[in-house]
């Protein structure tokens, strides 16, 4: 299979024709002589300059290293010609990489490739934020996390606008391999991170120093997989039941925790989130609610107290 399509070969031939030297048969023969022997012996002579260049390019495109060999053979003839160097630079950078060669001749594909790379970078950033969302429980980390989350949202908006622009163009949308569903998934994950951040910031200011240390230790244990799946599943189920009951009772209605509890229950019901991430959100809420125990005489706090004590005990019983 040729390295380049017929259209791409034609575009390269058109670019080469801009070199004054190739109008001379002698110079064209010099270029052919510089090619790999396995390639040059297959090139047929054509009297017409354009046809001859087409033959050179199409023959080179038949070989895995052919285009790279042709660019190397052309180099002495275009050195110093900035306009031509700009056109040919993507090919030099591509080397023998098929995908990169196609991209060099297809502006729409080049834009798609850049967009896919930005999506990949954004996905990696979100994964990192999801892993370290619990760090906003440390006051000195909150500003950094908020900044990174803001940047991730800005990048998303830019990528989304570029996606909409590209998919509105026929030649791009036909080759676009990143579905809009991935962008929607990224949007959902960013929204979830924002909720997690808000919950943690609201809750942590209510906690005593000991509660903060225990909260951080449990979050670290979760991240390091020191809690079993059964521990996580059981704790999440009990926590969801307790929080749902509190929401229905309205006992926290006039406290800063009311919205955090409501958002947590909604996150618990999100099938796209892993149980570990759900529990990460819910852990700080437990001591947060217990801090209101005396003020509000919460009737459901006994279950939360037992859950909290069990989680803290895990810190001492598991390596």
Image (spheres, rainbow, N blue to C red):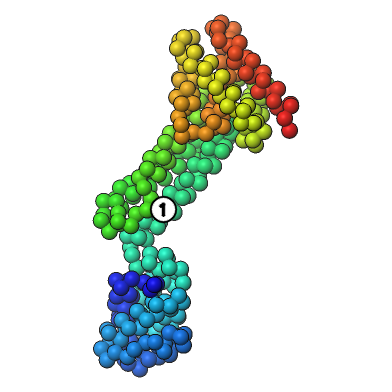
Q: Position of residue 236 (x, y in %)?
A: 56, 24
With 305 as the anchor, is 43 left or right in this view?
A: left
Q: Residue at x 53, y 15 (%)?
A: 242
Q: Is residue 75 above or below residue 131?
A: below
The residue labelled by disc 1 is 116
Q: Is residue 196 above or below residue 15?
A: above
Answer few, some or many: residues within 10 Å of disc 1's Cα (few below 14, many 20 plus, some between 14 and 19).
Answer: some
**What element does badge 1 sit on?**
helix
Q: Position of residue 44 (x, y in %)?
A: 34, 89
Q: Residue at x 67, y 18 (%)?
A: 309
| Residue 204 picture quarter | top right
With 210 as the anchor, is 190 left or right in this view?
A: left
Q: Is residue 207 above or below residue 225?
A: above
Q: Determine if residue 171 is in view.
A: yes
Quadrant in which the C terminus appears: top right
Q: Position of residue 293 (x, y in %)?
A: 58, 10
Number of marks drawn: 1
Q: Is residue 103 above or below residue 152?
A: below
Task: In this rendered view, identify the residue nearer to me: 63 or 295.
Answer: 63
Most distant residue in the bottom direction: 26
Q: Residue at x 49, y 13 (%)?
A: 245
Task: In this rendered view, identify the residue nearer to me: 104 or 149.
Answer: 104
Quadrant in which the N terminus appears: bottom left
Q: Determine if residue 142 is in view.
A: no
Q: Position of residue 264 (x, y in %)?
A: 49, 24
With 289 as the anchor, is 188 left or right in this view?
A: left
């Amino acid at each position: 299979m040729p390295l380049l399509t017929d259209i791409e070969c034609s575009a390269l031939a058109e670019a080469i024709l801009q070199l004054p030297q190739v109008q001379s048969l002698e110079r064209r023969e010099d270029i052919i002589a510089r090619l790999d022997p396995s390639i040059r012996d297959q090139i047929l002579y054509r009297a017409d300059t354009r046809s001859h260049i087409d033959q050179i390019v199409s023959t080179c495109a038949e070989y895995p290293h052919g285009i790279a060999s042709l660019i190397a053979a052309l180099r002495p003839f275009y050195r110093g010609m900035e306009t031509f160097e700009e056109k040919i630079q993507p090919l030099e950078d591509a080397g023998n990489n098929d995908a990169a060669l196609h991209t060099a001749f297809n502006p729409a594909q080049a834009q798609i490739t850049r967009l896919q790379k930005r999506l990949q970078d954004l996905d990696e950033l979100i994964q990192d934020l999801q892993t370290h969302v619990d760090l906003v429980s440390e006051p000195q980390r909150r500003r950094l996390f908020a900044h990174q989350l803001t940047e991730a949202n800005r990048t998303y908006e830019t990528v989304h606008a570029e996606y909409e622009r590209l998919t509105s163009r026929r030649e791009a949308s036909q080759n676009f391999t990143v579905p809009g569903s991935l962008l929607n998934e990224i949007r959902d994950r960013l929204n979830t991170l924002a909720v997690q951040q808000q919950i943690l910031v609201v809750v942590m200011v209510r906690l005593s120093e000991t509660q903060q240390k225990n909260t951080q230790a449990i979050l670290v244990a979760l991240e390091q997989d020191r809690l079993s799946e059964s521990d996580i599943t059981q704790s999440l189920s009990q926590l969801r039941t307790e929080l749902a009951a509190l929401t229905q009772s309205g006992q926290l209605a006039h406290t800063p925790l009311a919205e955090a509890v409501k958002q947590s229950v909604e996150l618990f019901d999100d099938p796209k989130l892993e149980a570990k991430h759900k529990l990460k959100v819910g852990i700080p809420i437990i001591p947060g609610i217990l801090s209101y125990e005396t003020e509000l005489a919460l009737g459901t706090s006994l279950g939360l107290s037992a859950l909290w004590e069990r989680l803290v005990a895990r810190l001492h019983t598991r390596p």
